[in-house]
Image: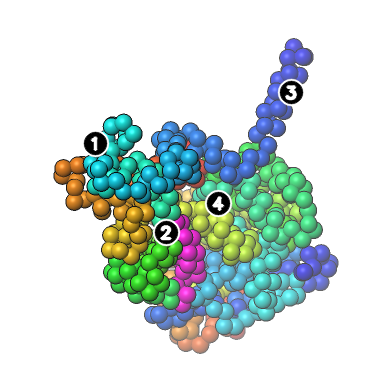
C-alpha cells in the first residue's frame, strides 16, 4: 500500500516530467500532450488553463492512467506521485491509487452520477472499494453522513437519486465522492463550467474551504481565468499540448513578461472599466493535433512571429521559476 | 409553547430516522413495482399460471391428458366434465392445457432466461471492452445468425437427439446471438457515459463497473425484449415439435396442441382457441410484468 502520510515537504505530491501522450488513430497519431513538466507541492493548487483541445483533460487522464485503452498511449515521460512512478504501476496498483490517493472531479455533474443509484450509495461505493481498514458497514455509513455534511447537504437526503438534486448540489455530491478517501491530490476538470455563476461561486468557496481543511493538493483545470485567479497558487498555460507559460499566480496575473498566447487570452476578456465594442479574440484556430506546425506551435497565430519561430523549438525563458516558451523574450534579453 | 417546540423537534427526529433507515435496493424496486397496477395484474396472471403448472397433478391427473378415447371426439366446451371440450382424439383440452403448461413454460422461459444470461454476459463483455474481444464475439455471432433459425435448431436437435432438453439447448444456441446484439447495443450506449469514467476514476474494478453501473442502466430494453420473446419461443418450440424433433406426442404441450388442432380449426375453433389463449396470456402477463419492472428499475419514472 502506498504511503499516504506526508514526509514533510521533501517530495512533491506530484512531479510530472516530460510527459507525452498520444492517441493512436487510424488517420494518424494525435499528439495531445507534448513534453509537459510541472510539480505540485503539498497543499498547492495549480491551475491548468487553455483553450478547448489544448490537452488539459488528456494530461489529467494521463496522470490517472485512464486514457482510452485502445488508442491512448504515453510514449515518453514520468509521473511521480510522492516519489513513485505511476507509469510503472500495474493496473491493479493503479486502480487502488485512483480514488484513494488521486481522485477526480468531473466537468458535468449532470452526467457524472449514475442515475439509478442513490447518492448515498455512490459515495459509499468509493469508501467500500478502498476500505483497507475493514471498517464495518455502519462506520462507512456514518462516514457518508459526515461527507454529506461536509459538502453542505443534509444526510437525510442520502437515499435520494441524482435527478432529485439541482446541478450545484450534484456537483457537491461529486466533490464528496472525490474527497471520500481523503486523497492527497484532487484533479478538478472544469468543476464549475457546467454551473451558473452563483452556484459556481458557492462550489469554489466550498472547494477552497475543504482544501484548507484537508490540506489536499489540487489541479484545477479551467478555461476561466477568473476562476483560476481566485483559487490557484500556480498556473500553467497550455497550448497545443505544451505548457507555454508556467509560474505562480502572481507571475501570470501581475507579471510583466508573458507568452504572446497568454497576452492574447487576457485581451480576449471583456473589461468592465472600459467600453469595448467587440471582443478581441486570438485570430485563427488551435492547430490540428495530428498535424502540428513546425517550430513554435503558436507561430501561425502569433502577432509577434519571427523567422526563427517557424522552425526549431522555441528557446525557453526562465526566471525564478517563471517559465515561458517563446523566442521573443530571449531576443529581448539578448538585445 | 416550550413543550410544543419540543414535540416538533421530536417529530423531526423520528422523521429523520425513518428516512435514514436504509431500505434495500430490491425492497425499493418492489415498492415502486407495487404501485404499477398493470404490472401487478400481469404478475397475478403469471403467478396463477405458475400455480397451475406446479399443482397440475392435483388439478387433474396426467392420464386424463393423454388417454385417447375416440368416442369422446370433439365434445364442445362447457359440457359436463369437459369445460374446454375435447380434441380430435377425445382428450380433455383443459387437462392437456394444465399439463402442457410444464413443457411450454419450461421451453419458453427456459430458452429466454438461459439465452439472456449467456447473451448478457458475452454482450456486456463485447460492449464494455470493445476492440478485439468485441470483434471476435460479434463476428462469431454474425456467422451463427447467418444460418436460418429453424435449420440451425433442427440440425442441433438432430445431432443431439430429440428431447426436451436438447430442444432447449438448440433454441438457446440459436437465440444467444440475438441477445448478444441487444445487450451489446444497450451496453455501448451506457459505456460511454461520464459516470462510467467517474467510477473508473474512483478505482472501481471493471467487473463491479459492469455489474453495478453498466447492466442496471442498460437493462430496460433487455427486459422488454426478453418478455416479448417468451411467446415466440413457445411457438418456435411448437414448430420443432411439429417437425417431429421436439416433444413427442402424446405429451401435452401448448404449441403442439395448436399444430395438431389446426386441421380442425374451421369446424372446431375451440381446439385452437384455448391453447392459443394460454400462450397469449403467458406472453401478455410477462410483458406487463416486464414493463413494470423496467419502470421500477428507473428511479426517474417513479412516483
Give the position of the C terminus of chain A as an image quadrant. Answer: bottom right
What is the C-alpha distance between the residues marked 4 and 3? 34 Å
Q: Is residue B20 left or right of residue B90?
A: right
Marked residue chain, label 4: A
Kindly identify the residue that appears in the image at 60 percent across and 60 percent down.
B208
The residue labelled by disc 3 is B10
Residue A90 magenta-highlighted: no
Please state which of residues B239 and A228 is positioned toward the viewer in this rendering: B239
For mark 3, does the 10 Å Cα neighbourhood hold few (<14), some (14 to 19), or many (20 or more) residues?
few
- On the image, the x and y values in percent for residue B140 come to 39, 75
Q: Is residue A127 left or right of residue B75?
A: right
Kindly identify the residue that appears in the image at 20 percent across and 42 percent down.
B268
Q: Are marks 4 and 2 on the same chain?
A: no
Q: Which mark is residue B111?
A: 2
For mark 1, does the 10 Å Cα neighbourhood hold few (<14), some (14 to 19), or many (20 or more) residues?
some
Look at the numbered disc 4 and give the secondary structure of its residue.
loop
* Residue contact at pointers 2 and 3, CB within 8 angstroms: no
Q: Which residues are magenta?
A: B108-134
Q: Is residue A204 left or right of residue B161?
A: right
What is the C-alpha distance between the residues marked 3 and 1? 70 Å
Kindly identify the residue that appears in the image at 62 percent across and 68 percent down.
A64
Q: Which mark is residue A113?
A: 4
Mark 3 / mark 1, whichever is N-terminal: 3
Residue B72 can be seen in this image: yes
Mark 1 / mark 2, whichever is N-terminal: 1
- On the image, the x and y values in percent for residue B217 come to 49, 53
What is the C-alpha distance between the residues marked 4 and 2? 35 Å
Amino acid at each position: 500500500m502506498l504511503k499516504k502520510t506526508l514526509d514533510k515537504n521533501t517530495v512533491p505530491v506530484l512531479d510530472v516530467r516530460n510527459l507525452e501522450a498520444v492517441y493512436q488513430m487510424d488517420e494518424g497519431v494525435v499528439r495531445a500532450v507534448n513534453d509537459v513538466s510541472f510539480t505540485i507541492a503539498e497543499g498547492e493548487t495549480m491551475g491548468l488553463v487553455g483553450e478547448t483541445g489544448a490537452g488539459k483533460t488528456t494530461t489529467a487522464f494521463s496522470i490517472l492512467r485512464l486514457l482510452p485503452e485502445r488508442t491512448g498511449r504515453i510514449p515518453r515521460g514520468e509521473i511521480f506521485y510522492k516519489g513513485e512512478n505511476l507509469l510503472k504501476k500495474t493496473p491493479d496498483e493503479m486502480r487502488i491509487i485512483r480514488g484513494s490517493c488521486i481522485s477526480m472531479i468531473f466537468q458535468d455533474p449532470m452526467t457524472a452520477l449514475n442515475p439509478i443509484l442513490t447518492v448515498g450509495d455512490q459515495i459509499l461505493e468509493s469508501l467500500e472499494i478502498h476500505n483497507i481498514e475493514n471498517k464495518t458497514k455502519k462506520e462507512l455509513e456514518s462516514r457518508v453522513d459526515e461527507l454529506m455534511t461536509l459538502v453542505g447537504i443534509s444526510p437525510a437526503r442520502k437515499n435520494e437519486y441524482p435527478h432529485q438534486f439541482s446541478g450545484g448540489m450534484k456537483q457537491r455530491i461529486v466533490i464528496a465522492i472525490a474527497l471520500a478517501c481523503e486523497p492527497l491530490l484532487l484533479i478538478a476538470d472544469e468543476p464549475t463550467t457546467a454551473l451558473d455563476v452563483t452556484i459556481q461561486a458557492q462550489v469554489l468557496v466550498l472547494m477552497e474551504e475543504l482544501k484548507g481543511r484537508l490540506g489536499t493538493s489540487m489541479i484545477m483545470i479551467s478555461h476561466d481565468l477568473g476562476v483560476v485567479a481566485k483559487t490557484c497558487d500556480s498556473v500553467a498555460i497550455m497550448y497545443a499540448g505544451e505548457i507555454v507559460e508556467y509560474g505562480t499566480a502572481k507571475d501570470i496575473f501581475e507579471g510583466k513578461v508573458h507568452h504572446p498566447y497568454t497576452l492574447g487570452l487576457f485581451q480576449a476578456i471583456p473589461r468592465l472599466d472600459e467600453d469595448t465594442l467587440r471582443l478581441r479574440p486570438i485570430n485563427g484556430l488551435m492547430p490540428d493535433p495530428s498535424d502540428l506546425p513546425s517550430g513554435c506551435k503558436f507561430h501561425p497565430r502569433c502577432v509577434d512571429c519571427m523567422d526563427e519561430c517557424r522552425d526549431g523549438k522555441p528557446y525557453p525563458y526562465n526566471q525564478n521559476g517563471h517559465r515561458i516558451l517563446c523566442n521573443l523574450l530571449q531576443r529581448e534579453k539578448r538585445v | 409553547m416550550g413543550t410544543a417546540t419540543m414535540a416538533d423537534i421530536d417529530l423531526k427526529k423520528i422523521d429523520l430516522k425513518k428516512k435514514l433507515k436504509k431500505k434495500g435496493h430490491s425492497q425499493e424496486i418492489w415498492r415502486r413495482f407495487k404501485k404499477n397496477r398493470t404490472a401487478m395484474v400481469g404478475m397475478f396472471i403469471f403467478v396463477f399460471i405458475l400455480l397451475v403448472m406446479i399443482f397440475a397433478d392435483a388439478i387433474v391427473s396426467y392420464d386424463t391428458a393423454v388417454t385417447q378415447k375416440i368416442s369422446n371426439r370433439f365434445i364442445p366446451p362447457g359440457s359436463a366434465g369437459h369445460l374446454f371440450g375435447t380434441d380430435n382424439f377425445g382428450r380433455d383440452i383443459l387437462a392437456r392445457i394444465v399439463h402442457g403448461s410444464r413443457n411450454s413454460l419450461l421451453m419458453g422461459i427456459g430458452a429466454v432466461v438461459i439465452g439472456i444470461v449467456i447473451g448478457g454476459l458475452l454482450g456486456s463483455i463485447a460492449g464494455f471492452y470493445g476492440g478485439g474481444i468485441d470483434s471476435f464475439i460479434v463476428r462469431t455471432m454474425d456467422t451463427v445468425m447467418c444460418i436460418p433459425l429453424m435449420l440451425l435448431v433442427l440440425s442441433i436437435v438432430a445431432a443431439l437427439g430429440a428431447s426436451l432438453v436438447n430442444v432447449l439447448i438448440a433454441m438457446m444456441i440459436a437465440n444467444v446471438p440475438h441477445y448478444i446484439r441487444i445487450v451489446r447495443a444497450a451496453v455501448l450506449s451506457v459505456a460511454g457515459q461520464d459516470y462510467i469514467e467517474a467510477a473508473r476514476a474512483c478505482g472501481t474494478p471493471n467487473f463491479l463497473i459492469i455489474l453495478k453501473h453498466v447492466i442496471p442502466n442498460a437493462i430496460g430494453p433487455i427486459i422488454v425484449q426478453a418478455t416479448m420473446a417468451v411467446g415466440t419461443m413457445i411457438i418456435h418450440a411448437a414448430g420443432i415439435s411439429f417437425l417431429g424433433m421436439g416433444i413427442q406426442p402424446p405429451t401435452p404441450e401448448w404449441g403442439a396442441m395448436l399444430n395438431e388442432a389446426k386441421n380442425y380449426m374451421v369446424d372446431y375453433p375451440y381446439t385452437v382457441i384455448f391453447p392459443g389463449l394460454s400462450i397469449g396470456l403467458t406472453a401478455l402477463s410477462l410483458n406487463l410484468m416486464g414493463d413494470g419492472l423496467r419502470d421500477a428499475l428507473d428511479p426517474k419514472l417513479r412516483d
